[in-house]
Amino acid sequence: MTAIRRGKVFSFLFVLVLIFASVDTGYVKAEESAREQDSKAVEQESNAAEQESNAAERENNAAEQENNATEQESNVAEQEVKATEQVKLSAKKKTLYVGQSFTLKLTGTKESDTITFGSSKKSVAKVTKAGKVTAVKAGTANIVAKVNGERYTCVVTVKKKVAVKDFVITFEGNELIDGNYISSYVGNKCQFAVTDISPSNASIKTGKFTSGNKSVLTINSKGLATMKSAGTAKVTATVDGVTKTFEVVVSEPKNTNLVPSLDYPKDYKEEGAKYGEYVKINEKAKGYEYFIYSGEEVLPLKISTSDGFSITYKVLDEEIIAAEWGEWKEDNKCDLELKLKPLKEGTAIVEVYDTEDESVRVYIVVHVLRAGNTVLSLETTDEDGLLDDGWSLVIDTQLETTRKLRLTTDKGEAVVCKIQNKEIVSSKWGKWNKKGARALTLTGLKPGSTLVTVYDKNNPSLSQSFYVVVE
């Protein structure tokens, strides 16, 4: 019985084990199934997210393509606008006199474009297929250029013309020699002009110039001529159909040197001015130096030249020196008289040069000096007003250390006090008064005697000397 019971117990336990094992396996399988389902769910969610991302990317690509298309359209439109803006008419308005003409041009178009011109009033202004507009009678007309459906308008005002009857030709502001001739030199540039157009209310106020011999002379329409080579050229000026012709003779430059010198009359006493030493102003130009005292009338110079023509001058310091040419000497046209008038003290430079060849040039340096005194007197400030013994001055240091003198001149300034031995005496000037006088104070330094000289540095011969004795 006991054995039977044990067998039943073992059987029961075995069944329980099988049941638990079965249950545990079911749990494991269920858990694995759940995990598998979770994994599939995650994968599905990931797939869904990826699909959403792909959809968003497709939308972005579509938007980008749309933006690119819009940008391309905008660029095309901008290019079209720019192309339209670049098309311009050469003039929007123009004033003409009857008979005058000009040509309108349309820029910014393509070669394949067809351009047409038309006039709103052909009786006032007419236009050709090429755009040449001609004034017919007084009035206003619109000249229209058409291209690619666009219209471009120029308003043309036509006035009644007052014809030119006469005019004058000038050369550098001067009239021509005998009205039809001038001479010049190779390398020179000259400005011609038309002036005094008559009648004064003439419609045309400008002229044009042409050269008949361009190897000798070239000239632009405004009258600026350049001399090319030696020879003769005929130049024609035209104003409103009226023409005048004149002759220009071009020569090689003739002045090769300029030499200044004093040009005083033979009986002139050369006291007021003197010829100075040669001065080198710079490496390329010669310089000459002269002196003149203020108060002199002029410094007369003679400028010796090789030819005498086309010589001019320029004063660089007009406050100090004034200049003018003297009389023209018919017997000697190569020597020119140049008068220099001193205005005030100082140094001035005068340039004399050939206008046809400015490398031919000379510099003149003029020093204007203050005129010397003609009166110079010394007196003490003592009661007698005279120097002691007439020629000496005593400083008694027991009584005083200084003595004062009064200097009187007619022009003042430029007065110097020279002391032979400055260890014995020192000097000090006072200020000039309105009467041309000033004080000179002498101070005794130590016992002894020394010579003192007071003189005009511009006229050293005007002086007064005396001894100073210090006791």
Image (spheres, helix red, strand yellow):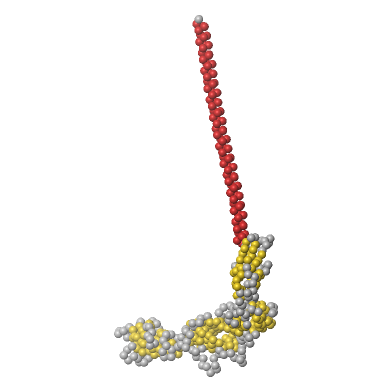
- Residue at 41 percent across and 86 percent down: it is 412
| Picture quadrant where residue 360 is located | bottom right
Q: Is residue 186 above or below residue 373?
A: above
Report the front residue among 326 and 455.
326
Is residue 169 among what the camera can see? no
Percent across and percent down for residue 10 are 52, 11
Percent across and percent down for residue 438 are 37, 85
Is residue 469 toward the left or the right of residue 237 in the image?
Answer: left
Percent across and percent down for residue 86 are 61, 62
Residue at the top extreme, as displayed: 1
Percent across and percent down for residue 264 are 54, 91
- The total of numbered circles placed on residues is 0
- Residue at 56 percent across and 80 percent down: it is 280
| Picture quadrant where residue 131 is located | bottom right
Is residue 230 toward the left or the right of residue 318 in the image?
Answer: right
Q: Quadrant of the C terminus?
A: bottom left
Q: Is residue 70 above or below residue 234?
A: above
Is residue 85 among what the camera can see? yes
Q: Is residue 143 above or below residue 184?
A: above
- Residue at 55 percent across and 87 percent down: it is 325
Residue at the bottom extreme, as displayed: 267
Report the front residue among 464 and 104.
104
Report the front residue among 53 and 238.
238
Report the front residue among 209 and 332.
209
